[in-house]
Amino acid sequence: MKIKLNFWIDVAILCIFLVAMEPGASGVFIHEWLTTSAVAILIVHFVLHWEWFMTLTARFFVKLWHSSRLNYLLSIALFLGFATLMVSGFAISEKVLPTLGVELAGRGAWKRIHDLSANLTLLIIALHIGLRWEWVWAAFKKIFVAPFVKERKADSPVLIEEDGL
Amino acid sequence: MKFLTRFFTVLAVACVFGFGLYYGIQSLPDDLPGISQGGSNPAEHVLQSAPQQPLAPPARDGRMDEINIGRLLRSMAKNLILISILACFTILAVRVLNKKPLINFRKK
């Protein structure tokens, strides 16, 4: 159950991120509201990996040169990347914050920071997927392949009987 | 309850970082390159100092309110391919560093 939930949350985040990467095509309205609502999904993703994060935080320096340490640092970078994206996005917001009656003093730099953090976050997402590929592939097989294999196994005695006839 | 506590802890950490970043950037002096209120593009400064002339219609910068499905799908595909290529290189690098075979031909 947890694997399925994690998998679909990851897929949702990736899809929202891909849509958000092209605000000119999705429209500013959808871009801003979609990404604002994605904050909750992102936080759920971080919360679901809380135990892993806390365990590694406690043991970080025990065995420093291990691939999980790189994954740990990438996760922090990913968190900071998304937080920067949200802050810079709110700073240049044209729809969400004005609708909520909030006006932030913007500067020219925020647009650049938003673009740069989006590109860097895309890079970090790719590295994150690459490092966690074994989990992604195992979850994919469990969700999409295993049910059909089980069905086939369940059907096979009937098929054998029919063949026997 | 535990989930909510963790949820709001993560949110609080993000907010602290966000406010720190926001006020950090806002408190930077205006004369730093790329920080000014009117934009960071040097071309804008040239335009500001140029004599007043009738302006051409504003160029479309791609930030519209209409949904362009074709462009959206193209962009998503482009970014997905980019992510796939980078992820593939990461998988290969991890396998090389862990001295695992790049392709396992042995059947289980």
Image (cartoon, rainbow, N blue to C red):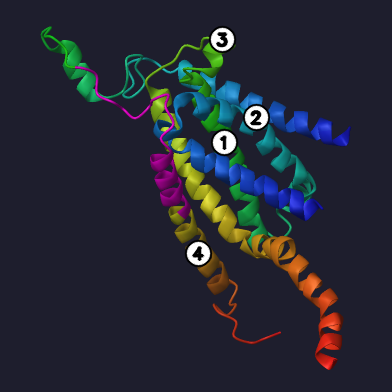
Q: Is residue B36 left or right of residue A43?
A: left
Q: Which residues are magenta?
A: B57-80
Residue depicted at 41% across the width and 35% down the height: B68
Q: Nearer the viewer, residue B61 or B27?
A: B61
- Host chain of mark 1: A
The residue that disc 1 covers is: A82
The answer to whether the residue labelled 1 contacts the one labelled 2, judged by CB atoms less than 8 Å apart, is yes
Q: Disc 3 on helix, strand or loop?
A: loop
> In the displayed structure, would residue B77 be above or below residue B55?
below
Quarter containing the C terminus of chain A: bottom right
What label sits on residue B88 in the rendered view? 4
**Residue B104 highlighted magenta (yes or no):** no
Q: Regarding mark 2 in the picture, which secondary structure is present there?
A: helix
Horizontal and vertical percent for residue A92? 46, 20
Outermost residue, front direction? A165
Residue A65 appears in view: no
Q: Amino acid at mark 3?
A: Val
Instruction: Please tell me which residue is depicted at 39% across the width and 24% down the height of the picture.
Output: A109
- Pinpoint the chain carrying mark 2: B
Q: CA distance from mark 2 to mark 4?
A: 30 Å
Q: Residues within 10 Å of mark 3 (few under 14, many from 20)?
A: few
Q: Which residue is mark 3?
A: A102
Mark 4–mark 1 CB contact (< 8 Å): no
Task: Describe residue A145's horizontal placement relative to residue B71 as left or right.
Answer: right
Residue A156 against residue A16 in the figure, above or below: below
Q: CA distance from mark 3 to mark 2?
A: 19 Å
What residue did someone put label 2 on? Answer: B14
